[in-house]
Amino acid sequence: MKKFLDPPLGADAPPLEIRAAVVDAIEQQVVTLGLDRRTFPYDRIVVRILAPHLEKTPLEKVFADLEARVRERLREIRCEVPRALGIRVSFMKKAPAGWTPAQLFSIDYGTRHDDVAPTISSSVPVLKVTVLKGTATRKVYVFREPIILIGRTAEPTDSRGRVRRNHVAFDDRNSTVSRAHARLKYDKARAEYRVLDEGSGRGTRIVRGETLMPVPRDPRGVRIRSGDEIQCGDASVRVTIE
């Protein structure tokens, strides 16, 4: 079982640490298909780096080999590497709306078959997440991101030192919320948000009217509708798709 600690990646983290965190985050998208078989379901990756105080040239130099680093990591874990994998990196002086206070980067994923390139954020609907039960860093979150991570603490790390950046971060008083509990993912092909349980200890459920639907540990996830309540352990949030 993975053990999550809490040493966050600080705002003054050096470029090499930021690059390592990006590679770790990309690795989390790997899907296990069966015994000793893994695949990476995307071939387009767009990384945005918040760098208000760092010179652009050193950053560009460090991130120039990001694609090679990602390919190397995927091979290390025996994951099939997409033949047409392409990664683009951009640097920003100001954080976009919807980023958490400690967030240093975002990653958009897509495939060459997508009708809209993943850099066009307007293709993703606005999603509002309201905390109904539990204590989190905010009461209300607003996102226009294709992937939103839910868990306990903002930046837990596992036993291998990999950092996970939870967009919806419950604090340690919410012991039934796992460090890596669930994620909301926008499926462009179906034009819908889906919720995935990420192996949480107390499970993820959808409350829709009088119906309670458990979310299985399946990489396809379950479709969510505007107004649904999502329970993560004993905590819960309401999602509104605008």
Image (tube, rainbow, N blue to C red):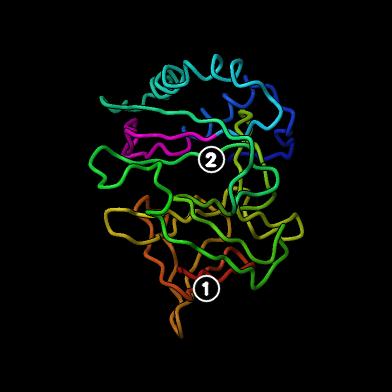
Most foreground residue, 67 or 99: 99
Q: Which corner quadrant of the image does residue 142 belong to? A: bottom right
The mark found on residue 132 in the picture is none
Per the rendered image, the range of residues in magenta is: 28-48
Task: Give above or below for 129 relative to 19.
Answer: below
Please provide percent x and percent y for residue 185.
43, 53
Task: Give above or below for 55 relative to 203.
Answer: above
- SS assignment at label 1: strand
Name the residue beneath numbered marker 2. Answer: 106
The mark found on residue 229 in the picture is 1
Residue drawn at point x = 23 percent, y = 42 percent: 113
Asked if residue 44 lies in the magenta stretch, the reply is yes
Asked if residue 135 lies in the magenta stretch, the reply is no
Q: Which corner quadrant of the image does residue 62 belong to? A: top right
- Where does the N terminus fall, quadrant-wise? top right
Tag 2: amino acid? Ser
Q: Residues within 10 Å of mark 2 (few under 14, many from 20)?
A: some
Q: Residues within 10 Å of mark 1 (few under 14, many from 20)?
A: many
Please provide percent x and percent y for residue 69.
46, 18
- SS assignment at label 2: strand
